[in-house]
Amino acid sequence: MPEKETLERARRDKREGKAPSTQAGEFVREEIEHIREGKHGARSTKQAIAIGLSKARRAGVDLPPSKGSSEETKEQAERDLSKARTGGKKSAKRSRATRKALKREGRSAASKEALSTQARKAARKRSAASRSRSAKKAAATRKK
């Protein structure tokens, strides 16, 4: 279950008309914090991000899977979005098992180095024009 503060931040982003990916970013940030404070671990930075995105979808953020996602990822995203609509809960037994498995994983997935490596890899897949567009948009929306 996401923290109250995270839900409030995501709602504020939605009210301000920000993109679903920005709203979901709050949940990813929460997940990274959980790993850093030792609540649980993650096998990789990608897994930590995936957990955050899944939580966002279940909390009601209208975030479709990316176009390049695998079939399994698309199916899981659809399940998460339907859980948000129907209010389906995960069983206590399953939740405990997930937490126990994540506790066995390492904490280095949330290190500054791992996050920056992941960001660089993700950026490398994008075209120069796409990177330039988002940089210009960021510069335009930056607080003066």
Image: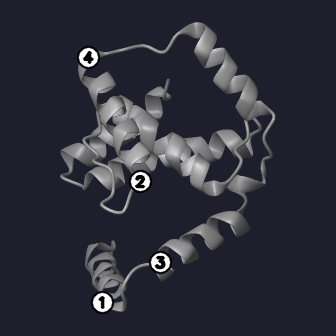
Q: Which residue is depicted at the point 60% across and 18% down?
A: 95
Per the rendering, the mark at residue 31 is: none
Q: Is label 4 in contact with label 2 (beta carbons under 8 Å)? A: no
State how far apart marks 3 and 4 are (Cα). Answer: 35 Å
Element type at mark 4:
helix
Element type at mark 2:
loop
Per the rendering, the mark at residue 129 is: 1
Q: Which residue is depicted at the point 33% across and 23% down?
A: 83
Where in the figure is residue 26, as x and y percent of width and height?
Answer: 44, 46
**Residue on which disc 3 sits:** 123
In the picture, measured across the screen, residue 81 lies left or right of residue 123, that is left
Say whether disc 3 or disc 2 marks the residue closer to the N-terminus.
Answer: 2
Where in the figure is residue 19, as x and y percent of width and height?
Answer: 25, 55
Q: Disc 3 marks which amino acid?
A: Ala
Q: Residues within 10 Å of mark 3 (few under 14, many from 20)?
A: few
Q: Is residue 35 above or below residue 68?
A: above
Where in the figure is residue 67, as x and y percent of width and height?
Answer: 30, 60
Q: Is residue 119 above or below residue 85?
A: below
Q: Nearer the viewer, mark 4 or mark 2?
A: 2
Q: Residues within 10 Å of mark 4 (few under 14, many from 20)?
A: few
Q: Is label 3 in contact with label 4 (beta carbons under 8 Å)? A: no
Q: Which residue is depicted at the point 60% across and 47% down?
A: 48
Q: Disc 1 marks which amino acid?
A: Ala
Where in the figure is residue 12, as x and y percent of width and height?
Answer: 29, 42
Say whether disc 3 or disc 1 marks the residue closer to the N-terminus.
Answer: 3
Say whether disc 3 or disc 4 marks the residue closer to the N-terminus.
Answer: 4
Q: Is residue 141 above or below residue 16?
A: below
**Residue on which disc 2 sits:** 70
Question: From where the camera sits, is residue 95 visible?
Answer: yes
Q: Disc 4 marks which amino acid?
A: Thr
**Residue on which disc 4 sits:** 86
Q: Nearer the viewer, residue 116 or 65?
A: 65
